[in-house]
Image: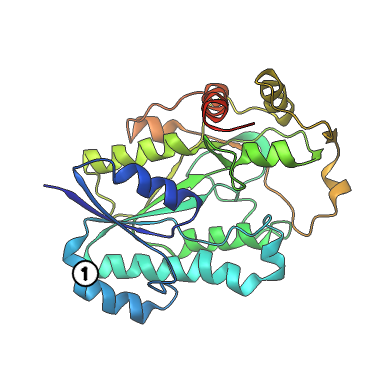
Amino acid sequence: MKKKILILGYGYVGGYLYERLKQNKDNDVTIVKREFLDYTDSSKVDQWLKKERDHFNYIINCSGFTGRPNVDEGEKKPELCYELNTFTPLRISSLCKTYGINYIHISSGCIYTGYEKQFTEQDPPNFGLFSKESSTYSKSKHAYELGCDYGLIIRVRMPFCDQLCDRSYLTKILKYNNLINQVNSKTYVPQLLDFIEHILRKGYNCRQKDIVNFVHPYALATDKIVEIMKHFGLQNPEWEWVQFEDLNCEANRSNCVMSIEKLKQKYGFEIMDEEVAIEAALTNILEDEDV
């Protein structure tokens, strides 16, 4: 039987996921923009699901507030940030629980900071709701995890892809004149899609609350990323190394490395090293883009 899948949010990850899943004839996939179904309005979603609930085995929520051009926007629009990152997905997960639909939520690992360890899913966030130093964005992501009691939460960080689109980490590095040298876990979007396909293919039960980090092992510092990009002929002549304090940002940033042991042990998914993922993305960018 076909897997019947609903994707909420036609943004960066949602758009890629829809294009990937619809290529498989075993999937019956629908994607919904907020303009079509205002999923911030739980009554409208409830009414819609009452009619459509038998049509979906999985609901995958890729919607949320990221902020443009960056998470500083969350400091300017805190109510919207909490609405889209905390309250709306909590309502959606609650409705999925009511109707017994598997629920997958794409979230963020930007609720940790520091290099004292590789953070696991069991570690209490130190850059979340209860931190005086954390951003509104990070607080809103942690608040969702605290309130959620249903579905699979996939934490990603600094996603990048095979195109020079403005949401990709690699594009940001290429376009930013000022760079900060920090080590951070990252997520290659095509492999994230591989993992979601793995979940669907294996028929994992996503009706119980669970959290999994989806990042790459052997996280690289920014200077190493720049070195690799230069090797591929991609560079910005205006690049300059600065300190975070020099940028006058409104919100602090998370800098951390996350553990993938649970990803491997519980979900049986082998993920490529970060350097390999970066090189794969750049190879595909050069093949497909006029750069």
- Inspect this view and state whether residue 207 appears: no
Q: Residue at x 20, y 74 (%)?
A: 51
Name the quadrant containing residue 203. Answer: top left
Q: How many marks?
A: 1
Q: Residue at x 52, y 31 (%)?
A: 288
* x then y, percent, for residue 195: 36, 37
* x then y, percent, for residue 19: 37, 46
* x then y, percent, for residue 46: 30, 77
In the rendered view, would you say 81 is above or below 215?
below
In the rendered view, would you say 78 is above or below 149?
below
Q: Is residue 138 left or right of residue 12?
A: right
Q: Nearer the viewer, residue 285 or 150?
A: 285
In the rendered view, would you say 81 is above or below 195?
below
Kind of residue indicated by mark 1 = Glu
Q: Secondary structure at mark 1?
A: helix
Name the quadrant containing residue 147. Answer: bottom left
- Give the quadrant of the C terminus: top right
- Inspect this view and state whether residue 289 appears: yes
Name the quadrant containing residue 177. Answer: top right
In the displayed image of the protein, which residue is found farthest to the bottom?
43
Q: Residue at x 71, y 66 (%)?
A: 75
Q: Which residue is mark 1?
A: 52
* x then y, percent, for residue 188: 50, 35
In this picture the colour scheme is rainbow
